[in-house]
Image (tube, rainbow, N blue to C red):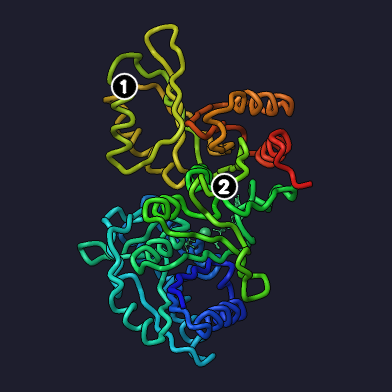
Amino acid sequence: MARIVLKFGGTSVADLDRIRNVAARVAAEARAGHQIAVVVSAMSGVTNQLVGWCQALSPLHDAREYDAVVATGEQVTAGLLAIALQELGVEARSWQGWQLPIRTDTAHGKARIQSIEGGEIVRRMQAGQVAVVTGFQGIAEDHRITTLGRGGSDTSAVALAAALKAERCDIYTDVDGVYTTDPRIVPKARKLARIAYEEMLELASVGAKVLQTRSVELAMNERVRVRVLSSFTEAPASDDAGTLVVDEDEIVEKEIVAGIAYSRDEAKITVRRVPDRPGIAAAIFGALAAENVNVDMIVQNISDDSTTDMTFTVGRADLARTQAVLGSAQPQIGYRDLAIDADVAKISVVGVGMRSHAGVASTMFRTLADKAINIQVISTSEIKVSVLIAAEYTELAVRALHTAYGLDAA
Ligand code: ADP
Ligand code: ASP
Ligand code: MG
């Protein structure tokens, strides 16, 4: 008998038939004698619609009200799954973030979980009741509902698994594991039986949507065993189904490049003709940080006179805010104008093997050059190389790189 957290993403609960399918899986685990907590996402498409409504009313809407709106998707699914479980004769109860509670900080729209009170659901799980918990949401100290950022139900699940000291956290989704790249754009992508926490963390942070970045960070710090698997295959899943996210030393065959990710969620901003003197970068990025805007890649071009251009990327969702912040800081910064390009994609190759192998970056640049794809910005870390390119070349670039690093399935 084990304590397990099962998480089901949007496509896994997309309609009532899918919810019945999830209920059957959960029922099977409960009947096998396990103590079960389930974390659910909103039904597929629902969160997008809720976000779209907020944006349509006001591009710079109040983040507290955004959270009040977008957290509702998960509430519906949790209640529906509890009903579906009860229909199968399984005792079940739904829980929203505030009811446990799942406490977060006050960074609305991208809140971080601070603690989870699991005592009550543990008592009920021990008595045979299944807890169905809303993903993606929590409650801040001012008692307002918060959300954890897109894809945040993964983080809810891992945090709950840590709080409940669960044996493992099974993340059910619409693919049967973590692949060398998104299998929806590269049919030759290979499924990985295991991936190191660090590689998964880096892949997630550069756009591999299969797990939210913060969920991997939490799993790594709290030693939660995470497995990614499909809710669309025959139940019950076999023990070796899916991909296990594990410590680096649990992986026998290490590749130099573990995977390739892309993100179309960024926008490039060039601040043109800023004075080339100390304090300008601090003025630009300080103003953005004060408004909670995360900046990713940054380049400063060489100047030939007393001015320069500063180029950087932000999340597309933060673009309107970025323009507003820079607009009002224009007098202090003293730039000429802004050039905005949202038609960009960031392509990244990731692997712990890069620490000890040279040539990964040059292979990337050569491969893109051979396809006549222009590189606009480059950034690197110890185990990652990222480039910014025109969005229209995303698929071409990812496929060519997947082949170039020898990742294609036989
Ligand atoms: P869920 O709704 O279950 O949370 P997501 O859409 O958030 O599902 O994440 C699953 C999707 O992640 C897959 O459908 C796939 O297109 C995408 N994906 C991106 N990169 C990868 C990868 N390396 N391996 C597997 N899936 C990936
Ligand atoms: N429903 C939320 C989203 O679509 C959270 C999640 O699915 O993980 O981003
Ligand atoms: Mg997801």
Closer to the N terminus: mark 1 or mark 2? Answer: 2
Residue 337 position by quadrant:
top left
How packed mark 1 is, by other alpha carbons closer than 10 Å (few <14, some 14-19, many 20 or more), is some
Mark 2, other Cα within 10 Å: few <14 / some 14–19 / many ≥20: some
Query: Which residue corresponds to the image point at 44% horizontal and 7% vertical from the top-left?
Result: 304
Q: Nearer the viewer, residue 110 or 352?
A: 352
Residue position for label 2: 251
Q: Secondary structure at mark 2?
A: loop
Q: Give the side of residue 224 with respect to residue 285, left or right.
A: right
Residue occupying image coordinates x 47% and y 31% = 381
Residue 53 in view of the camera:
no
Helix, strand or loop for disc 1: helix
Which residue is outermost to the top?
305
Q: Is the CB of the residue bearing disc 1 within 8 angstroms of ligand 2? A: no
| Number of the front mark, 1 or 2 | 2
Is residue 13 something one can see in this rendering? yes
* Mark linked to residue 280: 1
The reply to whether callout 1 and callout 2 are in contact (CB within 8 Å) is no
- The x and y percentages for residue 402 are 69, 39
Q: Nearer the viewer, residue 112 or 272?
A: 112
Question: Which percent across, then down, holds residue 89?
Answer: 51, 92
The verdict on label 2 being within 8 Å of ligand 1 is: no
CA distance separating discs 1 and 2: 45 Å
